[in-house]
Amino acid sequence: MFFKKGFSLNIKRFICAAVLMATVLSLCACIEVDLDSYFEGLLGGDAQQSTPAPRPEKDESADGENKPVEIPEAAAEDFTVTEHNGTNGNAGVAVVSYNGNETAVRVPEQINGAAVVAVYANAFSDREAEGDTSAFGVKQVVLPATVERIEYGAFNGCKKIEIIDLPFVGGTDGGNSFGYIFGEGGVPESLQSVRAGGKTVADGAFSYCETLVSIELTEAENIGNNAFKGCSALKSLILPETVTAMGISIYDGCDDLETLAVPCFPAEGGTWFAGMLFGGTSYVDNLAVMPQSLQNLTVYWQGDTVGKNAFYECDRLVNLTVKGNISSIEEYAFYRCRRLKSLSFKGGEGYVGASRVGTNSFAYCNALGAVALADDIVIIPDYCFYSCASLRGIKFGETENAMPESVSAVGKGAFAYCENLVNMALSSNITVLPDSVFEGCAYLSKLTVHESLTSIGNNAFSGCTNLNSVDFAEDGSLSTVGNSAFAYCVSLNSVSLPDSVENLGTYVFSHCWGLKNVKLPRGISAVPDGCFFGCTRLDKVFFNPDEVNTIGERAFSGCEYLESLTLSEKIDSIGKYAFDECENLVFTVKVESYAHTWLVNNGVGSNNLKFE
């Protein structure tokens, strides 16, 4: 039995996989990660977003705000105008027709010293000669804010128009549908982009405008029912923060929507979830009802709390911006947003992030690279960042990857399987590291255990294949190291457990095949089951032979490089397969002791025995 092959084929395959993972991670470590650049914009600037529908009438200013492109004002002589008093009774003019030859037209606020307050029917109609399809037609039109009325058919027959910027939607603010200004012919197929002011958008205002690609409303306060229903080609819809009321079925049939900026209005009781924007009745509808194409979402948040399940399984979102002074993120708020790469919280001046996060709040956000939180956070709860495989940076206030001293507790599995997390300095006020807290953090390379820590839970660092250094405080309070706490930490070379440790779990260092020497606490009475199982390079183990009375099952199984071990006469229990595949191991024992008898009965020959 002493030379029995105790490793199963599956275990060997696992170790090979671990070798491959460690190699890949070592190569990845050569890549410089600039977390400062990554965090830039999470709290102040706009979130990185995939390119939205083309908006040639807009420009990106230095501060990240979209601004209209400055089309030069058309000359006054390019227009035929007539007197038309404004709603306040002041004298003004109406545009009867545009006679110029520019395809991009900005109507001036004043013509002949009078404010432009109206646009008459057919004012911008294409001028086509019979049989000449290339005849003149406007492509871009910007109307000034002074306009109060646009007559039916003002853009009748504008077959080439692509972009239009209006002071309001319809004939007057909230009075008609968008198509009203195009007359009987309806919205032309050439039109792709609309930018409009006005406080009210009527019911069905843009419904079934099937060629529109981009809509931006700049001043709206009230959005009517079915406002954008059936806009099947719409890719970008930007609503302003000024919106205070929205109707039902607003986005029905907007199946190609990629970019959306919208306020959220919680239901009775304060509940809000993303699927409500698209007719969902429960948070479990989020995945089903949201457009598959929707990747970029900006939400103007009401209140200071992102509620439970708010973005639960919004699986297709890539970029999400929450605008508001968020102080609390509740359970499952962003759970399983698996494609989410950029999550930004945009508050007012001085805002640094939420100070409370809930259980599973970011779990399974597999693509998320960074998160910013406040520097007064107290608890990082269970499974908070579980399986955030791409997460490499967490910013607490101005500090990256270092828990503030305000943190007094970390939940089980809080950072488990954050495979790209390189480091995370622990708060000195944490007394317990619970089960699986950093399990599977393959890129984590260093751990410092503070004096205040009393317990390391089961599987706490299991599978941290790049972990090469664990520093324990010499005069600390650590008393318990749980089962498999450091299992499969294949890069560990040396470990010295402090003498304060009284309870050592099973398989605590199993398959740490890079481990060469270990010092166990002086007062430990047992080398537990599987303690060094599969530690193929282990050649030195230090423990107090006068205290140890038990060697557990498979405790040293597979320790091929281990050459010497002293088993005192106090030992009265040795488990099955305790020394399998330890061909080079020479035991120092007392003649006819329990250890001597057990070794002989289990096939250990005289060449592997040395007597006191």
Image: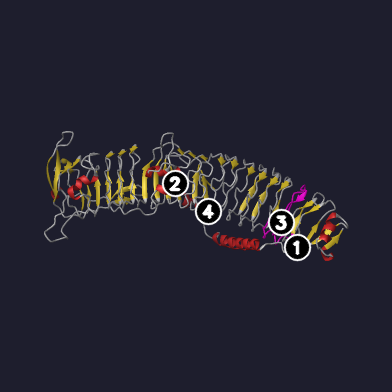
N-terminal of the pair, mark 2 or mark 1, is: 2
Q: Are marks 2 and 4 in contact (CB under 8 Å)?
A: no
Mark 4 vs mark 1: which is more N-terminal?
4
Quickly name the residue at label 3: 532
Q: Is residue 260 left or right of residue 100?
A: right
Q: Amino acid at mark 1?
A: Cys
Residue named by callout 4: 389
> What is the CA distance from the residue labelled 3 to the residue labelled 4?
28 Å
Q: Is residue 374 magenta?
A: no
Q: Residue at x 73, y 51 (%)?
A: 528
Quadrant in the rendering for residue 84: top left
Specify the quadrant that holds the C terminus.
Answer: bottom right
Q: Distance between the Cα atoms at labels 2 and 4?
A: 18 Å
Q: Amino acid at mark 4?
A: Ala
Foreground: 287 or 358?
287
Q: CA distance from mark 1 to mark 3?
A: 12 Å
Tell me the CA gap for discs 4 and 1. 37 Å
- Identity of the residue drawn at 36% across and 43% down: 262
The part of the chain drawn in magenta is: 510-539
Res 22 quadrant in image: bottom right
Can you identify the residue that label 1 sits on? Answer: 582
The percent position of residue 471, horizontal first and vertical second, equals 66, 50
Residue named by callout 2: 344
User: What amino acid is labelled 3 in the image?
Assistant: Phe
- Of labels 1 and 3, earlier in sequence is 3
